[in-house]
Amino acid sequence: MSSHIDYFDCPQCGGNAQREQDNRSGEVFFSCSNCSWNGGEVEKTDIVFKCPNCKVEGNSYIECVLDGIHHQTVSIIEADDCVIYNNLESEAEVDRYQCEHCGYILRDKDNYNIDNEEDLILWLRRNK
Ligand SMILES: [Zn+2]
Ligand SMILES: [Zn+2]
């Protein structure tokens, strides 16, 4: 083996990206098996939720379900990857995110419920 490869989630599409470093020259190459990302700066674009099940569109349809009985609706997702909640009142842990309209639960590629903002952003990128 003349190179070292690390795998991680593609910052552009959430697919399988890799960082390959040539042991001899030290050169580093980035690539993604799913899109054309090659290590460049990922353009931050506004992300808009579109439900794969009922096709409603808009970030106000993302319902954040907190541990227990509290429901919270995510209203805005800003371009800088920050999730802004509409009137967050509870400190409870996030249990899942779902479509407010049809109840579709957002799951990651391993079929686990999305339960944090980082994965939510990835999911939105991958499903836009
Ligand atoms: Zn990609
Ligand atoms: Zn839906």
Image (spheres, helix red, strand yellow):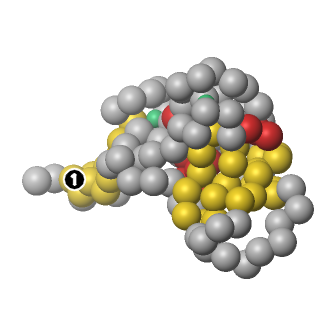
- Look at the image and tell me in which quarter the C terminus lies: top right
Q: Position of residue 41 (x, y in %)?
A: 63, 42
Left or right relative to 6: residue 39? right
Residue 43 visible within the image? no
Point out the residue furthest to the top here.
55
In the rendered image, the residue lying farthest to the left is: 1
- Ligand 1 near label 1 (Cβ, under 8 Å)? no
Q: Is residue 24 left or right of residue 39?
A: left
Residue nearest the viewer, comparing 127 with 71:
71
Q: Quadrant of residue 61?
A: top right
Q: Residue at x 79, y 40 (%)?
A: 60
Q: Residue at x 47, y 42 (%)?
A: 14
- Give the residue at the far bottom of this rendering: 91
Residue lying furthest right: 87
Q: Helix, strand or loop at disc 1? A: strand
Q: How many marks?
A: 1
Q: Position of residue 9 (x, y in %)?
A: 43, 49
Viewer-nearest residue: 102 or 48:
102
- Tell me where residue 123 sits by quadrant: top right
As drawn, is 72 to the left or to the right of 39? right
Residue carrying label 1: 3
The residue shown at (35%, 47%) is 111
At horizontal 82% and vertical 46% (from top left) the residue drawn is 76
Crowd class of label 1 (few under 14; some 14 to 19; many from 20; radius 10 Å): few
Q: Is residue 88 visible?
A: yes
Foreground of the two, 128 or 65: 65
Residue 68: horizontal and vertical position, in percent?
Answer: 60, 71
Q: In the rendered view, tell whether residue 90 sits above or below residue 35.
A: below
Q: Residue type at mark 1: give it.
A: Ser
